[in-house]
Amino acid sequence: MNARPTTSIICIARVIREEIGELIMGARFGGMPKEVHVEGEYVFRKEDLS
């Protein structure tokens, strides 16, 4: 996974139960959950974005 939340954020947001924005804010200001729930997988191609 790319460490920078660029295009990979599309997949991340689809496979975690938690809200990605809340996790980002929690990482900055504290309050991160003890665990993040990942469910399944998501794949897309460049053509899928148009």
Image (spheres, rainbow, N blue to C red):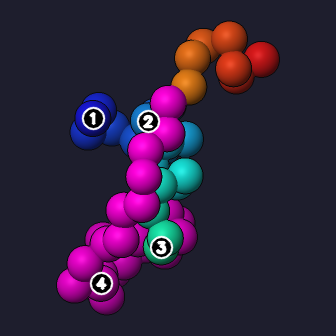
Q: Main secondary structure of the magenta part?
A: loop
Q: Which residue lies furthest to the right in this view?
A: 50
Left or right, 50 with reference to 47: right
Label 2 vs 1, first from the N-terminus: 1
Q: Which mark is residue 1?
A: 1
Residue picked out by circle 3: 18
The answer to whether mark 2 and mark 1 are in CB contact below 8 A is yes
Dot 2 surroundings within 10 Å: few (below 14), some, or many (20 or more)?
some
The answer to whether mark 3 and mark 4 are in CB contact below 8 A is yes
User: Could you tell me which secondary element the residue under label 1 belongs to?
Assistant: loop
The magenta segment: 19-43
Task: Look at the image and say whether residue 38 sits in the magenta stretch.
Answer: yes
User: Could you tell me which secondary element the residue under label 2 belongs to?
Assistant: helix
Residue picked out by circle 4: 33
Task: Look at the image and say whether residue 31 sits in the magenta stretch.
Answer: yes
Residue type highlighted by circle 4: Pro
Residue picked out by circle 2: 8
